[in-house]
Image (cartoon, rainbow, N blue to C red):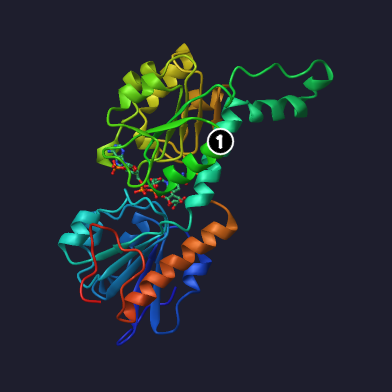
Amino acid sequence: MASGISSDKIDLLIYGPSKPLIEQGFSDQYVLHKFETLADLERLPADIFGRVRAIAVTGLVPMNASVQSRFPKLEIISSFGVGYDHIDAKHAGEHGVIVTNTPDVLTEEVADTALGLLIATAREFIKADRYVRSGLWLTQPYPLTVGSLRDRKVGMVGMGRIGQAIARRLDASLVPVVYHSRKPADGVTHQHYPNLIEMAKAVDTLIVITPGGASTANLVNAEVMSALGPRGIIVNVARGSVIDEPALIAALKSGTILAAGLDVFAQEPKVPDELRAMQNVVLLPHVGSASVVTRNAMDQLVVDNLKLWFAGKAPLTPLPETPVKGR
Ligand code: NAP
Ligand code: 8YV
């Protein structure tokens, strides 16, 4: 994309997967530089590092302290997605750089995905679809599923924006819900468990919807899976890092838990062969928010946050780690 003399124009780096709506969202007041990977970033002409004032991060590419510190004039990072475990927000805050994300506009879509994934896992929809396609239905009916929502109690791991939207869907489906988070969520009447193991003992289903990053790494571990027990179903729409993936594979193999529905993995897009070979898992390629309508809304929010900043106004969705002052 364009580079060269930018004088009074705003140099904006678009970093990550191609996103036409974001790339087309800026007037000729902006000079756009586009790079998809960290390796591409290394090939950026040296003079551009000193000119970039804004970075639009369009995917889960690393935006750590060492990448940020390459841009001495950086004012704002506008990131696509609500999760920001790929961005060192603390470093940005300490260096006066604002970081924005895209909360709320994807909440209902991700909640739909979580409920769909839970039902598909419990009622074996993907396996049953394969049964029809293979012609086996002509020989005998599909076996009754051991899993059902009718006799389940769900423990939400995380009860923020998306967790609450999932809980509303479960309430409507008459499925009892409790939750674990570090502190009780404002305005939520479901029972709160400060201790995840205690909650796992009290339920048979976990839906994981916390942020990723250090504070939640391997939060759902072998001990939690044992506490959940042999009827246990785990749905993860958070980040792969929140579940101890080798422990999950072992628990699924040994019957320590029944099944899992996973939208996210530890080393995306690599999914362990062992998981891919299992019949008691439903595997999605990180599509929680991935509809045209929701992704368009996320793209638009990335653009709006940047434009507001350069119009001298406060962006709509700054992170708590980088509060906007004086606008
Ligand atoms: P949110 O409103 O900030 O909610 C986060 C919830 O997690 C809160 O209840 C929070 O409560 C809890 N939490 C945070 N750290 C925790 C910890 N260490 N232990 C236990 N609970 C913890 O965020 P959101 O908008 O619901 O989004 C949640 C996450 O979903 C995102 O960060 C992202 O990783 C993931 N996501 C995935 C997809 C997808 O495509 N699969 C799409 C969107 C989002 P406390 O602070 O009280 O602990
Ligand atoms: C995106 C997500 O798929 O918002 C999030 O946290 O995980 C998803 O909506 C992800 O950000 C990809 O860039």
- Residue 64 image position (x, y, % from top left): 25, 53
- Name the quadrant containing residue 69: bottom left
Residue 288 in view of the camera: no
Work out whether 273 lies above or below 211. Answer: above
Residue that carries the numbered disc 1 in the rendered image: 117
Question: In the displayed image of the protein, which residue is found farthest to the left?
Answer: 94
Check the picture and name the quadrant holding the N terminus.
bottom left
Question: In the displayed image of the protein, which residue is found farthest to the top?
Answer: 254
Q: Nearer the viewer, residue 258 or 279?
A: 258
> Looking at the image, which residue is at 55% across and 21% down?
151
- Residue 65 image position (x, y, % from top left): 21, 55
Work out whether 230 lies above or below 170. Answer: above
Question: In the displayed image of the protein, which residue is found farthest to the right?
Answer: 138
- Residue 191 image position (x, y, % from top left): 37, 32
Q: Is 219 positioned to the left or the right of 265 in the image?
A: left
Q: Secondary structure at mark 1?
A: helix
Q: Is mark 1 within 8 Å of ligand 1?
A: no
- Name the quadrant containing residue 179: top left
Q: As shown in the figure, which amino acid type bears the numbered disc 1?
A: Leu
- Residue 213 image position (x, y, % from top left): 29, 42
Q: Nearer the viewer, residue 220 or 130?
A: 220
Disc 1 packing (10 Å; few <14; some 14–19; many ≥20):
many
Q: Quadrant of ligand 1?
A: top left
Work out whether 324 lies above or below 176. Answer: below
Residue 162 in view of the camera: yes
Q: Nearer the viewer, residue 240 or 305?
A: 305
Q: Nearer the viewer, residue 158 or 270?
A: 158
Check the picture and name the quadrant holding the C terminus.
bottom left
